[in-house]
Image: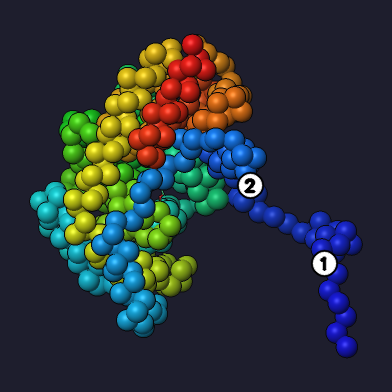
Amino acid sequence: MVAALAWPTAAHNSRYAAMKISSRADVAPFYAMEVLKAANAKAARGDSVLHLEVGEPGRGAPAGVLAAAHRAIDAGGIGYTEAFGLPELRARIARYYDETHGLNVPVGRIAITTGSSGGFVLSLIAAFDVGDRVALGVPCYPAYRNMFKALGIEPVYLRTTLETRFQPTPEMLAAAGPVDGLLIASPANPSGTMLVGQPLHALVDYCNAHDVRLISDEVYHGITYERAAETILGNSKGGIVLNGFSKYYGMTGWRLGWMVLPDDMTAPMERLAQNLYISSNAVSQRAALAAFDCRDELERNVEVYRRNRDLLLEALPRAGITEMAPADGAFYIFANVGRLTNDSADFCARLLAETGVALTPGIDFDTEEGHAYIRISFAGKTDAIRDAADRIVSWLS
Ligand SMILES: Cc1ncc(COP(=O)(O)O)c(C=O)c1O
C-alpha cells in the first residue's frame, strides 16, 4: 500500500532550507501587480473599484482575431510551429513594415516570440554576456532592470527628466562611459513619450558610431496621438526591434510578439529559440494573421484612448496635478505629485482605500525619484476614466 503523502510539512521544508536559490532570481516585485491585488481584494469586499493601474487594453482582441482563432481550433492540427514562427505570419509582418514604414524587411530577419517579453529574454541573452554594461533611461518599464538582473547584465542608468521628455540623449550616454548596449522605448512606459526625428536619429547614430547594440522596444507602436511612431529599422547598424500583439492589437493574453533581427543574429537566435521555448503558441499565431485586417476596429480603440487621455489632461490640473510627461503615445500619464506627497506608494494606497481608484506608484519605474510620481493607465473604458478623474479631483480638492 502506498503511504499517504503528507506535504508540505515543517520537516519537509527544513530539508530544503540549506539549498541554494540563485541571487539572480531575487528581483523586485512589480508594484502595479501588488496594487492590482489590493484593488481586487477591495472589489471582493463589494467596494466600487476603478482600475487605472494596469497597462492592459480594455477591449481585448478584435473580432476578426477571435473568429480566426475559432477557425484555427476547428481546423485542428495545432502543433509546434517552426521556432521563428509560421512563415505566413512572418511574411505578413514584413508586409506591415512595407505598408507602415516603406521598408523592405527580409522575412528571414523576422522572428515570432512569446510576447515581446519572450523576445527581450532572447535578445538580451544573444546580445550580451554576463557582466556587460547596458544603458537605459530611468524612469523605465521595471521588467527591463529585472531581466538585466536575472541575466547578470549590469544596468547603466541614464537619469532622464521632463526636459528630455524622460528619454535618454547621446550626451547622457557619452557621460556614462563605454557601454555594450542601449535599450530605448518609444512610445515609452511609464512616460508615454516618443523618440522621433532628430532625438531618435542622434541616438541611433551614436550607437552606430560606437558599436553599441541598440535594442528598441516598439511594442506601443500604433497607439500614438500627435504623430506616428518611428522605427529604428533602416538606420540602425546592428539594432534589434521588439514589437508585439499585446498593445495596439489588444492581445495581451495571447502571448505573441515579434523581433526584427540584424543578419548576424538570426542563426544564433533561432537556435536559442528552439532550445528555450521550441515555438510560440500556434493558435495565437494563426489568429494574429487576421489582426492586420482589423484596422478599423483597432483605430477606434486608439480614438477611445485619445478621448481618455484628453479627459485626464483636462481634469488632473483641477486636482493640482500639473506637471506631467507629454503623453505622445501608449496609454499612460506619468505625473509628478511631489507637491502632494513624498511617498507615492502611500499616496496610491490611500487613494485606493478612500476612493477606489487604483493607480501605480512611480517607484515601480524609478527607485530613486519615483516616490514623487504616479502612473495613470487610461487603457480602460471612458466612463471608468471619467469616474476616476472625478473621484481624484474631489479627493484632492
Ligand atoms: C514597455 C513595455 N515593453 C514590453 C512589454 C511586454 O509586453 P508583452 O510581453 O505582452 O508583449 C510591456 C508590457 O506592459 C511594456 O509596457
Residue found 39% across the figure and 19% down from its top? 316
Q: Which residue is mark 1?
A: 7
Direction from residue 41 to residue 151 in the image, left or right: left
Compared with residue 309, is residue 44 higher up or lower down, i.e. above or below? Answer: below
Residue found 40% across the figure and 32% down from its top? 385
Q: Mark 2 and mark 1 in contact (Cβ < 8 Å)?
A: no
The numbered mark, 1 or 2, whose residue comes first in the sequence reads 1
Report how far apart the C-alphas of labels 1 and 2 lie in the structure: 25 Å
- Which one is closest to the eye, mark 1 or mark 2? 1
Residue found 42% across the figure and 42% down from its top? 55
Can I make out residue 179 in this image?
no
The percent coordinates of residue 185 (x first, y second) are 33, 40
Residues 363 and 48: in front is 48
Can I make out residue 50 in this image?
yes
Residues 254 and 356: in front is 356
Query: Helix or strand or loop: what does disc 2 sit on?
Result: loop
Q: Amino acid at mark 2?
A: Asp
Q: Amino acid at mark 1?
A: Trp
The percent coordinates of residue 335 (x first, y second) are 42, 23
**Image mark for residue 26:** 2
Compared with residue 383, is residue 372 higher up or lower down, i.e. above or below? Answer: above
Q: Residues within 10 Å of mark 2 (few under 14, many from 20)?
A: few
